[in-house]
Amino acid sequence: MIGHALLRRSGPGALDGWDRPIAAGFGIGSVCFLIGPLPGVVQLIGSGPDAALFFLGSIFFTLAAGLELRQATLRRGARFGRDGAWWSAAIQFVGTLLFNIDTFDATRTGFSVEQDNRLIWAPDAIGSACFLVSGVLAYRIAARGGEHDHAWRMAAVNLAGCVLFGISAVASYFVPATGSILDLAAANWGTSLGAACFLAGAVMLWPASESTRPQEVRT
């Protein structure tokens, strides 16, 4: 989704069959990450189901990112690995895999602080960094023409989500001296607000009509 607005159709309706499943996957995943950290949710459903909600959301992120990478690869096969939109999609996909790892590990209990940082925080931080790099690539390409069109708006809102996820990742570091999270409020709100941005991006992708699709951007 971060770089999806940069992909262009080779013919009428070529992406119509993929926009909706990609938007739906990111939308469902975003809802999971939006709801999971909200105040009172963990008390309402329990820590185990709450952790499972994040893991479920990460799976939907990965499915959607995999479809997006497939589209980027099929559309830009002649320039495989040399196209900014492809790299944005590929790095985003790697980030979602790392989110799969950390959210799955978060469903397990009994870790020491060192294990929490190694098994949960580290893949979360690296995954968030991947999202940030992907978001910056997409934004730079979308902003190159100087027009605030549909691609630019999608790239901007998704980049904001990447920044917020990055803030959340830093704030969620487990402090060895105390055994607690560095800043729980910042971690929770960064995750929820970042997910809200990704949800907005998914909604923007869903209609993706002929009139709203920007022209092809090549790097």
Image (cartoon, rainbow, N blue to C red):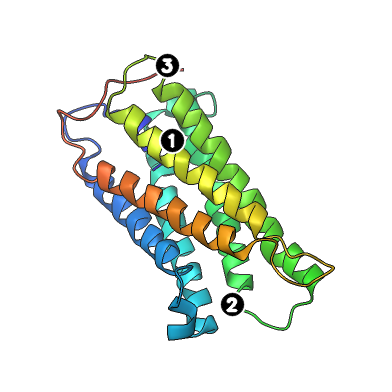
Label 1: which secondary element: helix
Q: Classify residue 96 as left or right of residue 143.
A: right
x and y percentages locating residue 196 in the rendered image: 38, 53
Label disc, if present, on residue 73 of the rendered structure? 1
Residue at far top of view? 145
Q: Is residue 7 visible?
A: no
Number of marks present in the image shown: 3
Mark 3 — residue?
Answer: 144
Helix, strand or loop status at disc 2: loop
Q: Nearer the viewer, mark 1 or mark 2?
A: 2
What amino acid type should be assigned to the residue bearing mark 1? Thr
Reading the image, the residue beneath label 2 is: 107
The answer for how far apart the CA atoms under marks 3 and 1 are is: 22 Å
Check the image and report above or below for 175 versus 138. below
Give the mark nearest the N terminus, 3 or 1: 1
Whether residue 197 is visible, yes or no, is yes
Q: Is residue 131 above or below residue 123?
A: above
- Contact? badges 2 and 3 (CB < 8 Å): no
**Residue at screen point 73% across, 65% down:** 174
Instruction: Identify the residue at image location x=75%, y=78%.
Output: 111
Question: Residue 203 location in percent, x, y?
Answer: 26, 48
Element type where label 3 sits in the image = loop
Instruction: Look at 78% across and 64% down and name the residue there.
Output: 175
Kind of residue at badge 3: Arg
